[in-house]
Image (tube, rainbow, N blue to C red):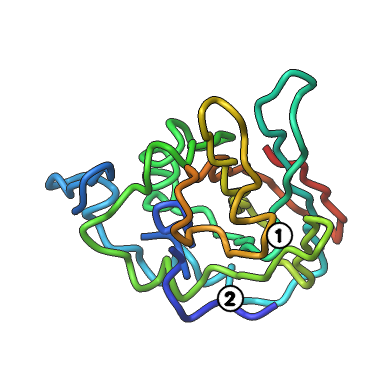
Amino acid sequence: MQPASSTIALILGATMALPLVVAGCAQVGLPVGSPLSTPIAPSEVEWARKSGANTVSGNAALKAPGPAGGASHTCAGQSANLIPDTAYARARMTAIFGNDSRGTRAASLGPVKFERDDPLYVSTLRTTRCDTSGSFAFARVPDGVWYVTTSVKWQAPVQVAGTPVAGAQAAGTPVGASAGGQIEGGSMMRRVEVRGGRLVKVTLP
């Protein structure tokens, strides 16, 4: 998998194209001296550009709220991202998810917007797409610490006089299309460390 060259809309906030103001969105400023205001040094990510012997595979799924746990939804069709660890990446994960080890951000909170995306953050992340079962994989990953991110989102059923009506997504409308139902689910992240030619399996959230 080659590093992505486009910005991730993660999501997330960037969500990931790559992770990136409007009502309902949180904006993260760049206070002087913070990791988000300090450019990534090329030496911080030189290792991440190499081809390695590890594989990171994963699956992402969430259950909709409901009496019996609700229907299960996956990241099918969504981008999955592998982001190399840097001070900037750690600060960015913390801004989005509240920590830099593992977290989720509800879609209802809206995306986190950043004043700028560090060019090396964007150019060194790797991206793929979740398959129909919500699975994804990254091959030839070099030794190091990475952040795995993706999102699971769906259109909630529209309520009419207290009765659920078939939602837009069930009718084939892409998530995000206007159909009256609220977007549910959210974005998710997990920190992983790979070394020694291992296969690392990640379950999100």
**Residue 28: which disc?**
none
What residue lies at 73% left-to-right and 67% top-to-bottom? 141
Closer to the chain start, of discs 2 and 1, is 2
Q: For the residue carrying disc 1, how many other residues have a C-alpha within 10 Å: few (<14), some (14-19), or many (20+)?
A: some
Task: Give the residue number, with chain letter if any, for mark 1.
Answer: 143
Which residue of the protein is positioned furthest toward the top in this rendering?
67
Vertical arrangement, residue 198 with respect to residue 157, above or below: below
Q: For the residue carrying disc 2, how many other residues have a C-alpha within 10 Å: few (<14), some (14-19), or many (20+)?
A: some
Residue 115, by quadrant, is bottom left
What residue lies at 54% left-to-right and 77% top-to-bottom? 4
Query: Which quadrant of the figure contains the N terminus?
Result: bottom right
Residue 11, x across and y down, in percent: 47, 54
Residue 26, by quadrant, is top left
Residue 121, x across and y down, in percent: 42, 66
Kind of element beneath mark 2: helix
Q: Amino acid at mark 1?
A: Asp
Q: Amino acid at mark 2?
A: Arg
Residue 91, x across and y down, in percent: 37, 44
**Residue 49: which disc?**
2
Kind of element beneath mark 1: loop
> Relative to residue 159, is residue 171 drawn left or right?
right
